[in-house]
DNA sequence: ATCTTTGTACTGACCGGTCAGTGCAAAAGC
DNA sequence: GCTTTTGCACTGACCGGTCAGTACAAAGAT
């Protein structure tokens, strides 16, 4: 079998298992079994458990960052911001397991991949920051806005809301959740 | 020694160790040693490692929820909202390792004490929701606001910003971060 | 055309260490 | 005297990582 297909299968299995039980509680044997592959294959392809995890994170964040960038591209700044938020919400809706893995494992202390994990996460937040910066430059947002902090805030807000949505109220419509998020983002919170 | 004093010592030791090396990497032997207690005592008091962590989580969230409630009490709704956000930011700044534990353990789908973790987290978000509801009732926030989703959003936004702050930019002042957060919350984002 | 080599992908039994949890007799504390 | 704690030896499951070996296809070699 082609190497890339095997890696793909291992990624999928690992994402599911880690989202269920956490990285430390997920064994290499489990991942191999779920992927329908021998344990040795994991080591042949990745060398170690943590290397598998690092590759997994990179793979997922690349896709997330690309989705966010695509959503933003070619739109005027404020539209782009809304599009990015929509795209993030949609991405998490579709890749809930990965989102859980991302939020849970980024903030674990210890290990060396944890450093990598943070760097990788910043790639996604970076897209949001870029959009905010563009909006500031276009004069659409206040000039003294701390785009770094604001990007963290927006990203984290959407991530939390999306996961709470899926976990606690999965029947609520995308549009509904999206609308509340937009209202918050636009500062339409206060009474008219 | 009194049981409660022993439990207290074990909580402190466990929190410290988790901050250093993470939850899974922390062994019961380490916790016992750090607490200056025999390993058997851990099992006499808690029965199992996961029961110890569950109790630890509950202990921490009780303190967080109490801090948020105290901050809100006796203030007019909108002031209360800002006070709650300040309190959350401050709490996480002071108990960073606990916040990490909370965020990491809440988002796993399997197991049973993960379920407990979610319930426990909702206790903290519930305080935010209560404040938002009060503000809506007082006519300070738009009547059709989905307070549940908005509470998730606010809580998650602050949590993310606080952890990013501590991890990436620990020298930035509390006031600074706080100000950006407030601007976002009040919808003062758009250019004047 | 047939044999031999080489490289790649994968296998699964196995090893050595780790760690949660146990058992228990003796000592402290209340 | 009942609860709580200690100290320590012990167990047994589990798990990351290894390694000798299989399968097989493409590339020489004769």
Image: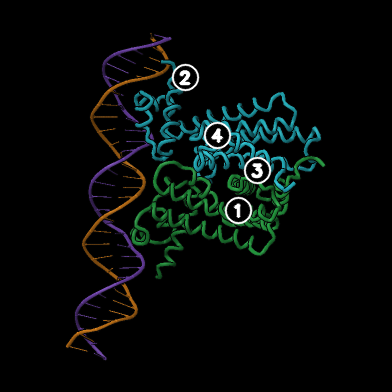
Chain colours: A green, B cyan, C purple, D orange
Locate residue A165 relative to residue B101 in the image: left or right. Answer: right
* Secondary structure type for disc 1: helix
The residue that disc 2 covers is B4
Q: CA distance from mark 1 to mark 3?
A: 17 Å
* Secondary structure type for disc 2: helix
The crowding category of the residue bearing disc 4, from other C-alpha atoms within 10 Å (few below 14, some 14 to 19, many at least 20), is many
Q: Nearer the viewer, residue A139 or A167?
A: A139
Pointer 4 or 3: first along the chain = 4
The numbered disc on residue B153 is 3
Circles 2 and 1: CB distance less than 8 Å? no
Q: Nearer the viewer, residue B175 or A173?
A: B175
Circles 3 and 2: CB distance less than 8 Å? no
Q: Are marks 3 and 2 on the same chain?
A: yes
Q: Are marks 2 and 4 on the same chain?
A: yes
Total residue callouts: 4
The crowding category of the residue bearing disc 2, from other C-alpha atoms within 10 Å (few below 14, some 14 to 19, many at least 20), is few
Q: Residue at 41% across / 53% down in the picture? A: A30
Above or below residue B25? Residue B44 is above
The numbered disc on residue B92 is 4
Circles 4 and 3: CB distance less than 8 Å? no
Q: Residue at 36% across / 23% down in the picture? A: B37
* Secondary structure type for disc 3: helix
The residue that disc 1 covers is A128
Residue A131, given in percent of the width and then of the height, sits at 63, 55
Locate residue B31 relative to residue A143 in the image: left or right. Answer: left
């Amino acid at each position: 079998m082609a190497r890339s297909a095997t890696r793909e299968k291992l990624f999928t299995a690992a994402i599911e298992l880690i989202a269920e039980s956490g990285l430390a509680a997920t064994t290499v044997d489990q991942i191999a079994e779920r992927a329908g592959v021998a344990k040795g294959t994991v080591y042949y392809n990745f060398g170690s458990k943590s290397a598998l995890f690092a590759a997994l994170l990179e793979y997922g964040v690349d896709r997330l960052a690309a989705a966010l960038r695509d959503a933003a591209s070619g739109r005027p700044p404020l539209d782009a911001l809304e599009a990015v938020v929509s795209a993030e919400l949609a991405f998490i809706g579709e890749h809930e397991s990965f989102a859980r893995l991302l939020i849970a494992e980024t903030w674990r202390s210890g290990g060396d991949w944890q450093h990598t994990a943070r760097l990788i996460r910043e790639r996604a937040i970076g897209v949001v920051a870029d959009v905010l910066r563009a909006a500031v430059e276009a004069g659409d947002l206040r000039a003294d806005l701390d785009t770094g902090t604001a990007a963290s805030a927006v990203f984290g807000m959407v991530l939390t809301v999306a996961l709470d949505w899926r976990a606690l109220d999965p029947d609520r419509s995308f549009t509904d959740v999206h609308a509340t998020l937009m209202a918050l983002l636009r500062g339409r919170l206060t009474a008219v």
